[in-house]
Amino acid sequence: MQRNPQLNANGELQHLLSIEGLPREILVQILDTAESFVGVTEREVKKVPLLRGKSVFNLFFEPSTRTRTTFEIAAKRLSADVINLNIAVSSQSKGESLLDTVANLSAMHADIFIVRHNSSGAPFLIARHVKPHEHVVNAGDGRHAHPTQGLLDLFTIRHYKKDFGRLTVGIVGDVLHSRVARSLIHGLTTLGAPEVRVIGPQTLLPCGVEALGVRVFHGMREGLRDCDVVVMLRLQNERMRGALLPSAQEYFKNYGLTLEKLAVAKPDAIVMHPGPMNRGVEIDSSVADGPHSVILPQVTFGIAVRMAVMSIVAG
Amino acid sequence: MKLPDAEALCEKLAGDLRSHIKPTSAMIGLYTGGAWLAERLHKILDMKSPLGLMDIAFYRDDYHAQGLHHDPKRTRIPFDVNGRDLLLVDDVLYTGRTVRAAMNELFDYGRPASISLVVLADRGGRQLPICAQHCGARVEVPSGMRLRLKRGTDGRLALALEPHAA
Amino acid sequence: MRVHIKNGRVLDPASGKDAVSDLFISEGRIVESFSGKADRVIDAKGLVVCPGFIDIAVRLREPGYEYKATLESEMDAAVAGGVTSLACPPDTDPPLDEPGLVDMLRRRAKALSRARVYPVGALTVKLAGETLTEMAELAEAGCVAFSQANVALADTQVLWRALQYAATFGFPVWLRAEDAFLAKGGVSHDGEIATRLGLAGIPSFAETIALNTILELTRASGARVHVCRLSTAGAVELMRAAKAEGLPVTCDVGIHHVHLCDMDLGYFDSNCRLEPPLRSQRDRDALSRALAEGVVDCLCSDHTPVDEDGKHLPFAEAEPGATGVELLLPLTLRWGEARKLALGAALARITCEPARILGVASGRLAAGAPGDVTVFDPSAPLRVSPEMLKSQGKNTPFLGLELSGRVRYTVVAGNVVYEA
């Protein structure tokens, strides 16, 4: 079995490509380090000099303003120089190859590549070809992984619920296409959450998903019962076109989170969403803006978590 | 070799400091040994201003060689640094690099009126122009060894020598 | 050219012969003996002497894909691997749907004087699945069968007509069983590994549903059908039943699918991006067993050289296919050992069995058979590396693997076309 390409020979994190395969200690190290960075983000001078002189290249092959902005803020708070590259991807385009793009940036003395790509595995390919002092952080690859999102979700859960060992977590929606769901599932099972559930229609649940260590539910009533944490996934419009779902309305009726459906969860359950939300499709405004929602804190924690990730891989 | 009694040094330092405490004074201890010492001194001196505790992980000058040290603690400074006469507390003063990092971090919180360095033990070996205004004792440390402050389960402080990690 | 191969372990799977003896070739054919001096004497002491290997799926990349590989390089690779006859699929650019292209290919191959090349013609024009090709003309130009290669033929009515037409002339039709709609967008086996890696999967029933269709249409048309590159345990059972029923069907499996499964994708190794995809352990084991039992008739390399640019891409974007004609022997030997088969039984899968599928006289060492012989050292080690591969394609999932079985001499029509 090949060595996990994220870890160097000393078992230290040199790239962050996927939560899967990372030992518990490293996940805890990232969460603890992020805790320290929360303090930095709350004071007036929100910078530390850790990555001064380092260049962080945001290599986004899939457009995204939110994620790219949080990485940019995080990198700047570490005093790094940030360069943003939005590369339109077209499978027909005969432009520069992925590895050629990376090689060119390498020649401009990059230290960290933050990579978002619509093809699963792209960051692994890049990590195989960068120089020893260069580090790759996966900002989302196809439907495979979104490790920083998974980590900030874990951080949020830990912040409100403290102990993973007693939690029932329900993940609702399009798990089939969701890299966020996969990363969170791997993180929760590694940190010992005893019950992780996926809830959705059969068309949106991937083949063999139980093998990831989750229980499958097709109904919200049974799926959300006694949940401590409810994670709502975004439903993209394309799903209706691919014969996976008939309409947003029917989806909302059966799988959209309303206060009524949430009532079967624990009274102090928290509601999370990776964003951006489709109000009235996967989540009702009364829940999104209500007391259970921790959606905005997720965003704040996201910056501290990304600062932690960059500090650890670049060290 | 016989090391000085940390508890006794602590009492001595408190005695030295008592006359220097002003209304604008505030104390900040550096994790981990400096924090223990500061907690003790803060209590003995019955200081009005709350105690600050600082981790310098993000300001160290050896990040590029050593990476981020495991288990950084969260810096908490529950008062406004501007215009304060700060007492920066650490257990052992050696090269001076820790203090340099601490001062850089402090200035990201504001502009203090003054900073005085309080250490339990000074082992010499300075690599930067840093000195302690209040020092418990000078201690000779054999090469290859480290001088550490330990805290027992009963809360008693003690100095100890350990081989330097490779 | 008179060739005397002496002292070797002569192994002829077709007849069951397995003994240390001499082999004689004269005027391009195997003979009992000849009097007088041989033009070439080969001392095969310690080596195995067997019929030259027949690989029924080797992409030579001409015409059209010369930047990936050329006829020269791939023919060199084939004979270095002991392959004396090969069939090439019609998915060249342009596809082999015109007699002129087939003719040119055969001439080019013949002029190189390496292995014998048997082109498989396109079943439909441009492989587009709409219009039938001029199969009779193509057969005259040298096509031994008709196929869609890896291009789906979704219109079952066109498929039905194509089989009927081929049956009229007795032309064999070679088909991959894959439902175009269920396979759409898929790049790996739909299962736990695809879910972990976030790859779009092709379910097993994409193969079995299509195979059911093919078998029904075979039943109705009477066409001779060869099913290419089985990948599922389900398909094995369908073939078993079809043969028991007496349908004129045969099938093959690619060399990668008896050794590897979806777990070998590891961290998105694009050298494992294959068509059909590598499936589960259970599927791999079923295919391996079925090949030993004879339910699957023969083994082939499905040789597909891909340039570096085509593989240095994220998994789903990488070009499918692996280079493998040079590895056919060592991988067949390894498979045979795993199944605890006698050497002859293992070699049958790349000699007399594919010869039967192709309908050629080679693949046996009987007197009068073509003088195509391979002499190899079964225990000589080799380490798979880009440097040792003669093919221009270095894209193999077996890089770094230690195998054994090295070809020492390859003889085609009595000419020594390769020696180590």
Image (cartoon, rainbow, N blue to C red):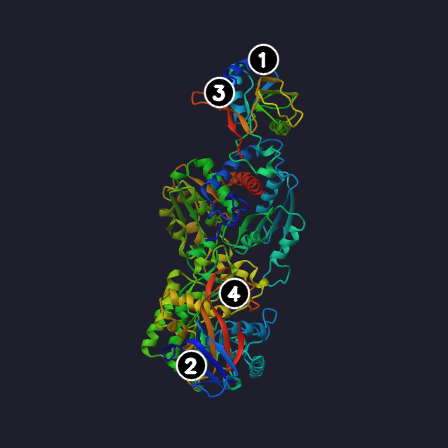
Q: Mark 4 and 2 residues: CB-CB less than 8 Å, in contact?
A: no
Are the residues under badges 2 and 3 in a single subunit?
no
Q: Mark 3 and 1 residues: CB-CB less than 8 Å, in contact?
A: no
Residue on which the image places disc 4: C320
Residue B158 % position (x, y): 49, 20
Left or right, A140 with respect to A212, comes to: right
Query: Mark 3 or mark 1, which is nearer to you?
Result: 3
Marks 4 and 2, Cα distance to the nearest angstrom? Answer: 36 Å
Q: Classify mark 4: helix, strand or loop.
A: loop
Residue on which the image places disc 2: C365
Q: Quadrant of residue B87?
A: top right
Chain of the residue on which disc 3 is drawn: B
Q: Is residue B5 above or below residue C84?
A: above
In what quadrant of the picture does the C terminus of chain B appear?
Answer: top right
Residue A214 % position (x, y): 39, 49
Q: Is residue C118 visible?
A: no
Chain of the residue on which disc 1 is drawn: B
Residue on which the image places disc 1: B16
Residue on which the image places disc 3: B157
Residue type pointed to by label 1: Asp
Q: Classify mark 2: helix, strand or loop.
A: loop
Q: Is residue C310 above or below residue C142?
A: above
Crowdedness of circle 4 by 10 Å Cα count: few (<14), some, many (20+)?
A: many
Give the number of the disc on residue A243: none
Residue type pointed to by label 4: Pro
